[in-house]
Image (cartoon, grey):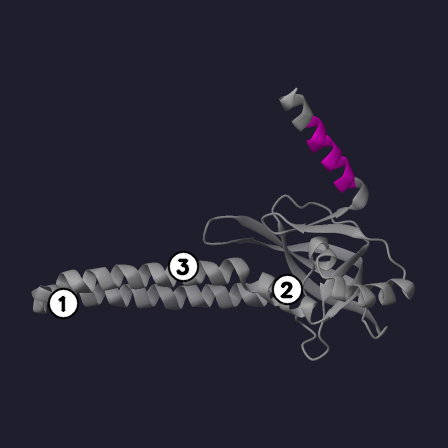
Amino acid sequence: MQLKIAKIINSLLIVLTVIILALAGGYIFVYNRYPEFRTTYLIVFVLVAIGLMLFFRWMEEGWDKRVITRMVKDGKVALANIKHSERVMRMRDSTFTNFWLYEFVADLVTPDLVNLNEVKFWEKMNADTQQIPNGSVFVTYDPEKPTQIFVVPNVLISQLPELMPVVRKIEANASVRYLDTYYNKGMVIKSMKDSLAEQRQAVEEKNKKEG
């Protein structure tokens, strides 16, 4: 799904660029034919261009997050036991932030306790991601949209108490070995052990600076 979103976002950028260039060409026409309106046209052009770019950044930055939040609130999640992951391609957004697109193969357990084996999905990972440990993460899952799979940050699961019955039901009927998942310029997936070690190190460094 992340690859599909990236392609749509790139197409959107091309369309917006064409619109802005067309408006810029329109200013030259107005400047030559209707000089009395050139200041008004220029102001409108600048406002429209800024609005289009802000809209693009809003789409680029938050499209996947809005889809994830909506699906999780609707209980459309599954437990994914990651069996394999590998880099597919490097990606970069309009602010030149780099990411890695990873392909995952996982066994899914749905809220109805349906087991789906060897399911493939793709996720946009932090550029520093090297090796992703095998283990359990929650993902979005809708049987009516089986390709719309995203890794869900742990904090989002914990913020929705109404989701707990679904989580407990899956935990009681599946083998679970949770990984830590969170956003940091792309998704980060680490073992709980590594995340705790990093947190302890960060606290120690903070205490040294304060001391």
Residue range in magenta is 194-205
The residue that mark 2 highlights is 69
Q: Please name the residue that numbered disc 1 is placed on.
A: 30
Q: Which quadrant holds residue 130?
A: top right
Q: Identify the secondary structure beneath mark 2.
A: helix
The mark found on residue 54 in the picture is 3
Q: Residue at x 67, y 46 (%)?
A: 129
Decide: is 79 above or below 112.
above
The kind of residue tagged 2 is Thr
Question: Of label 3 and label 1, which has the lower sequence position?
Answer: 1
Q: Is residue 133 above or below residue 71?
A: above
Decide: marks 3, 1 in contact (CB < 8 A)?
Answer: no
Eye-nearest disc, 3 or 1: 3
User: Of all residues shown, which one is farthest toward the bottom?
Assistant: 144
Looking at the figure, which quarter contains the N terminus? bottom right
Residue type at tag 1: Val
Q: Position of residue 27 (x, y in %)?
A: 18, 64
